[in-house]
Amino acid sequence: MRAASSVPKLSRQWPPSTLRRAWVTLLALSLASTLLTMLPAPPAFVGSGILILALIKVRVILARYLDLAGSPTWLRGFTFVMIAFGCLILALFLI
Amino acid sequence: MSDTSLIEELPGELLMWVLIISELLVFGAGLIAFMGIRLTDPAGFAEAQSHLHRTSAAFNTAVLVTSGFLAAQALHWRRTARRSAARLALIGSALLGVVFLIIKGIEYTGKAAQGITFETHPFFMFYYLLTGFHAAHVLAGVGILLLVAWRDDVRNIEAGAQYWHMVDLVWIMLFPVIYLLG
């Protein structure tokens, strides 16, 4: 019973290039976050940018590493909650 | 017409997702508390944060996302019957976890040498609690990755990789809040 219900999950696969793209994206976004802190810009701008980049990284990990790209409803749900969390952190930062 | 329920759409074991959500809630609550306490002394928090080494933390982010990539790649290889490649990728992933812990250890040692402890400032209490708890998860993850490299059933690797990605996910949120938002 357990094995039968798992067949669709195990057959879900993405091409290796999809994973590589996700990894390169994550590295680039991490570098961008660090570079952003060096900009002579207002803290509100830098803080917002850093959190937006973090949320994009979260979405990439959820979609590609954790494979939620094949479960769009769950991906949308997780993304919504993480965006709400990011907005709360940003609001606390900007107060 | 598909009869797949929403729960069945989740990749891997349901219990792993329960664990992932629980861990995200725990760390999320910790970060919200951190930002809440920061409101009482923003200048003190910014000053305390200036003692952190952003470059090594950024390097650790690269280490962890690369480790996560290897874990995800291992699952792909195991599903396509490339068993040895999958095992090597899992061992590589675990080794990068060890690199993360070594860098974290150097960071803690540096703080200790400066006399910075839990009691120095509320910032450091949260810093040690959140990054230390995360490091404990990394340590457990290294053991899990090595275990699933040995017992390399697809389900085991999938569960191990999911745990590792959760550790990755938590760090992706810890890093900007603790190290960058000054």
Image (tube, coloured by chain):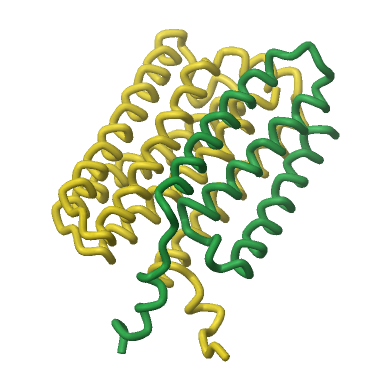
Chain colours: A green, B yellow
Q: Please tell me in which quadrant of the rendered image residue A48 appears.
A: top right
Q: Position of residue B114 (x, y in %)?
A: 46, 8
Q: Which residue is drawn at the image coordinates 31% and 27% (left, top)?
A: B99
Q: Which residue is drawn at the image coordinates 19% and 47% (left, top)?
A: B87
Q: Quadrant of the C terminus of chain B?
A: top right
Judged left or right of residue B128, residue A3 is left
Judged left or right of residue B173, residue B45 is right
Q: Position of residue B30 (x, y in %)?
A: 59, 44
Up-down: is B73 above or below A90?
Answer: below
Up-down: is B4 above or below B170?
Answer: below
A91 or A26: nearer the viewer: A26
State the residue lying farthest toward the top.
B114
Q: Position of residue B37 (x, y in %)?
A: 70, 35
What number of labels is visible?
0
A93 or B119: nearer the viewer: A93
Up-down: is A69 above or below B181?
Answer: below
Q: Which residue is drawn at the image coordinates 54% and 84% (left, top)?
A: B5
Q: Position of residue B60 (x, y in %)?
A: 44, 27
Q: Quadrant of the N terminus of chain B?
A: bottom right
Up-down: is B58 above or below A70?
Answer: above
Q: Which residue is drawn at the image coordinates 52% and 48% (left, top)?
A: A61
